[in-house]
Image: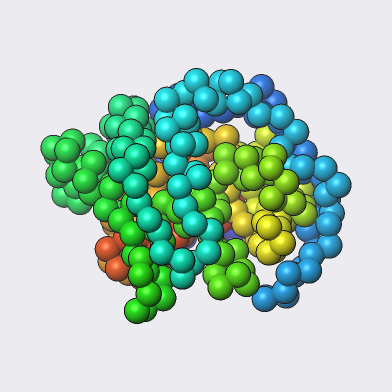
Amino acid sequence: MMAGRVNLNHELSKLFNQLWDADANRMSPAKDYRICLQGKAGYVPAGSNQARDSARFPLFQFVDEEKLKSIKTFAAFISLLDNYEMSTGVAEVVTAEEIAEMNRFLDAILETKVMQITHDYLVEKKWSKPNLKDFKSQLYNIWFQLYNRAPGKSPDSCGFEHVFVGESKRGQEIMGLHNWVQFYLQEKKNNIDYKGFVGRQHKSRPDEDDQVLNLQFSWKDLVKPVGSSFIGVSPEFEVAVYTVVFLMSQEKITKEVVRVEEYELQIIVNRHGRYIGTAYPVLMSSNNPDLY
């Protein structure tokens, strides 16, 4: 156990626990939504789209959509999910209405305590400017600025699309899609077939109230052998966590081990130049004693 703890980033753990506690919009397991974990997923070789189905039923048994849509940040977030073209290599066309939706989303999250704490922290580190307008532009660039994933192609991707919406690479594999609301909505449309949970080191079976999970699923016939995701958290919480890790380093890939609540996680952020390429949590263990 001690080996893993050496690399624990205490400063980030402290900050992320503050954000977790401030996340008033987070949905509560068993109350606002219910999941059904079912069987443990099998091994899928890289590049294969065949997966044993260890789950007869959807992952999400129930989500209180009325509540979801009544929360400003979730409502603004959901309106963004249908703005993107699934396949990379297909240019994204951004309309004035979509730009308005992006601005509405950023304005909504900037009103939350989660983003206020995040902004204060980033200003203190001199990674963001104190003016809220500047901070909003910075977030817009990191998350919504389009770029091309393949050199010489027209802009076909952005951090928000990759992390929250998901995309496919040459129609062969799923990239991104690390967001529970998108997972739920796609599952409801029968685009996603949940295949089972992926076990981890210290506890073979997750609980139905765990708010970080490693999952296996197929999306429009493409298999994601392991997709990891926060469950129930607000979009502002995810944007905050990934933005902080993105800004703390210029490395291509940043990996930070943190303890949030009972979860020991590795937060992984992949940089695409000045923008987020991908970002996701990997659950290492849960049922840890509360450190902070």
Q: Residue at x 47, y 23 (%)?
A: 71
Q: In this view, does 216 lie to the left or right of 264?
A: right
Image coordinates for residue 229, horizontal then vertical, percent: 58, 48
Q: In this view, does 211 lie to the left or right of 235?
A: right
Image coordinates for residue 223, horizontal then vertical, percent: 69, 63
Specify whether residue 206 is in view: no
The N terminus - image quarter: bottom right
Q: Residue at x 36, y 78 (%)?
A: 151
Q: Which residue is drawn at 47% across and 31% down?
A: 74
Q: Quadrant of residue 59?
A: top right
Q: In this view, does 19 lie to the left or right of 285?
A: left
Number of numbered labels in the structure image: 0
- Viewer-side residue, 160 vs 241: 160
Specify whether residue 139 is in view: yes
- Viewer-side residue, 264 vs 127: 127
Q: Residue at x 60, y 64 (%)?
A: 174
Q: Is residue 159 left or right of residue 188?
A: left
Query: Up-down: is 262 above or below 71?
Result: below
Image coordinates for residue 133, horizontal then vertical, percent: 17, 38
Q: How is the image coloured?
A: rainbow
For the view shown, which residue lies furthest in the bottom direction?
A: 152
